[in-house]
Amino acid sequence: MIEGNQNFFLIDDQKLVYETALQLCEQAKEGTKQVMIIEGGPGTGKSVVAINLLVEITTRGMLTQYVTKNAAPRAVYQSKLTGTMTKTRFAALFQGSGRFVDAEENIFDALVVDEAHRLNEKSGMYQNIGENQVKEIIHASACSIFFIDEDQRVTLKDIGTKEEIKRWAKDGEP
């Protein structure tokens, strides 16, 4: 996909979400911060839409990253991209959710957050860094796109809920 090949085709609902997210990214470029929550169960194609968005937003010349707490998807993408891009370029596209603790406001045009239900309050190995990953992601990006399935929260530390995202998106206050 990064080389321009269409590997995943979007179905109707996915296309609608994809196009809406791209419109919000364009609006964010004009100075209006945008936050989008995309909810779907297992197998509904959230990750497929997320990767398609990463590619298209990057193609449009916007600074974006694919964000997930889980290192497994990042490892899969890295293995698929080995030989097609440098590790430095890969690292610039795919990040863990704890990376935005000290990020400047709106430093990214867009952050595409897959598995947002797995976000934590604090970052770091000992969960002692930062204030709230949802807040930090919204702060760091002009357009934040959260893919979520609240039924897939795994631990008590997982705080990624629609309500949590809405609270921080409203005006930066919990």
Image: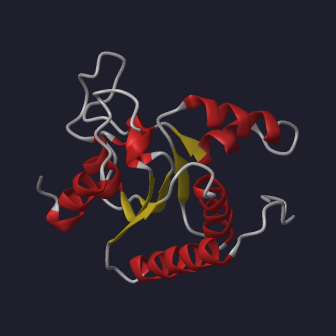
Q: Position of residue 27 (x, y in %)?
A: 42, 83
- For the N terminus, the image quarter is bottom right
From what the image shows, is residue 163 above or below residue 18? above
The residue at 26%/31% (across/down) is 122
The residue at 87%/64% (across/down) is 5
Q: From this viewpoint, which residue is outermost toward the top?
A: 126
Give residue 51's quadrant in the image. bottom right
The residue at 39%/37% (across/down) is 153
Q: Position of residue 98 (x, y in %)?
A: 39, 35
The colour scheme used to paint the residues is: secondary structure
Q: From this viewpoint, which residue is outermost toward the left?
A: 173
Q: Is residue 90 left or right of residue 100?
A: right
Of 48 and 137, the residue lying toward us: 48
Of 126 and 103, the residue lying toward us: 126
Q: Is residue 92 left or right of residue 114?
A: right
How many numbered circles are shown? 0
Q: Is residue 152 left or right of residue 19?
A: left
Give residue 49's quadrant in the image. bottom right
Q: Position of residue 132 (x, y in %)?
A: 24, 41
Give residue 10's quadrant in the image. bottom right
The residue at 15%/65% (across/down) is 171
